[in-house]
Image (cartoon, rainbow, N blue to C red):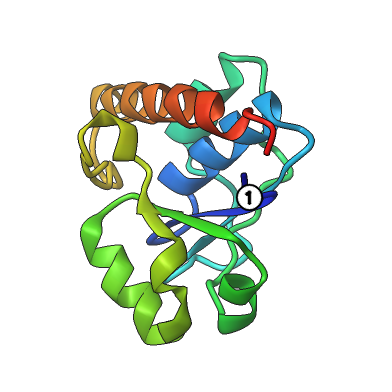
Amino acid sequence: MPDDILVVCIANTCRSPMMDLLLQKALPQKNITSAGINANIDQPMNEYSAKLTAKLGIDCTGHKARQLTLQICQANQLIMVMEKCHIKDILSIDPTAKDKLVLVGKWQGDIEIMDPYGQNFEIYEKTFQLIKKAAFNWIKKLAIKS
């Protein structure tokens, strides 16, 4: 199983940091990070995303959005994306990344987790529930010793 794992969304302030932090909490032995295809560089986590993550006792005050780069892609063995269109975006940055790209919702029938940005808190809650379920499924797979 991969030890270096990257979670990607657009801005790296809503979805990817939620998934990243959930995985980090459950799998501290793994190197799990996140980045955005069009990141709001150095911005903290979205207020709603942070509130939902904090309800699980996860401190997200240290999160700062970062831009996805070729170096970041190449440093990771597994790259999880929220939407299918992110695969194309990542391949334009790193054409060699094809075999390590996978949807966050792979174990939920390859669902896409859409961006809640600009929506109300209830939409963020629904998004967080999808991410929590995806994280639980990934934790079961990634916790298996290789």
The picture places residue 144, in percent across and down from the top left corner, at 62, 29
Left or right relative to 23: residue 102: left
Q: Evaluate whether residue 59 shows in this view.
A: no
Pick the residue in front: 116 or 135: 135
Q: Mark 1 — residue?
A: 2
Pick the residue in front: 51 or 136: 136
* Residue drawn at x 41%, y 85% as measured from the top left: 95
Left or right relative to 76: residue 129: left
Q: Evaluate whether residue 17 shows in this view.
A: yes
Pick the residue in front: 23 or 119: 23
Q: What quarter of the picture does the N terminus occupy? A: top right
The amino acid marked with disc number 1 is: Pro
Q: What quarter of the picture does the C terminus occupy? A: top right
The picture places residue 93, in percent across and down from the top left corner, at 44, 84
> What is the quadrant of residue 38 in the picture?
bottom left
Dot 1, crowdedness within 10 Å: few (<14), some or many (≥20)? Answer: some
* Residue drawn at x 32%, y 75% as measured from the top left: 89
Name above or below for residue 6 compared with residue 52: below
The picture places residue 117, in percent across and down from the top left corner, at 30, 47
* Residue drawn at x 77%, y 33% as measured from the top left: 28
Left or right relative to 62: residue 141: left
Left or right relative to 10: residue 2: right
* Residue drawn at x 38%, y 22% as measured from the top left: 133
Name above or below for residue 99 compared with residue 60: below
The picture places residue 103, in percent across and down from the top left corner, at 33, 49
Label 1 secondary element: loop
